[in-house]
Amino acid sequence: MSSHLADVRVKVADYAVRRGDDIIATIGLGSCVAIALYDKQTRTGGLAHILLPSVSMSRETSNPAKFPETIIPIMLAEMRALGVTSTAHIRAKIAGGASMFGQLVNGTGINVGERNIVATREALAVAKIPIVAEDTGLDYGRSVYFHLTDGRIEVRSLKMGDRVL
């Protein structure tokens, strides 16, 4: 695992799109999901830390980075502005969506973490971006370090150790 600190830090309900050799990180994913989009031809990528599965679940909807359905199109547009000519080569990796508080689920019996994973998959399918790797679900938090040099994602967890996607 890399000991290099992040060049760019993405907070909850935030995102960043960069091109080059940066490392974009987000710390402390619980039920939230990190969405990493990457074009290896241009070494352009974006990382979002989404909070909720849908705009319909929030009274405050002015921040598009809260939701997969609104942030993915924005990230793709910014990637195009940085030189990505086609979305055909963009791939996604996702992490997070944990059930941090087991019994705290809504009336459907599905927790927010699982709903975030499902909504992220649906939003990526709508955008026609394939998911090539993921580390999602279960009951532990994660931090993500996205390396734009090669598209590698380091997922770090106190409970489960580190892995590379």
Image (cartoon, rainbow, N blue to C red):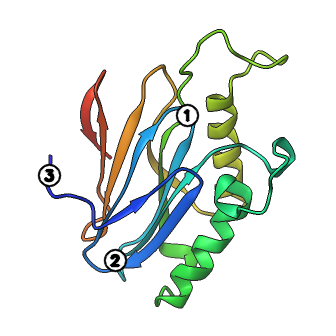
Q: Which residue is mark 2?
A: 43
* Residue 86 seen in this snapshot: no
Q: Which residue is mark 1?
A: 97
Which of the labelled discs sits on residue 129, or is there none? none
Q: Amino acid at mark 1?
A: Gly
Mark 3, secondary structure of its residue = loop
Identify the residue at horizontal 70%, vertical 44% (top origin): 119
Q: Residue at x 64, y 60 (%)?
A: 65
Residue 140 at x, y = what percent?
43, 23
Outermost residue toward the front in this view = 60
- Choose the circle earlier in sequence order: 2 or 1: 2
Query: Do tag 2 and tag 1 residues touch (Cβ < 8 Å)?
Result: no
Position of residue 80 measured from the top left corner of the image (x, y, whole percent): 55, 85
Q: Residue 74 at x, y = what percent?
A: 65, 73
Residue on which the image places disc 3: 2
Would residue 75 appear left or right of 4 to someone viewing this image?
right
Q: Give the mark, 2 or 3, whose residue is nearer the N terminus.
A: 3
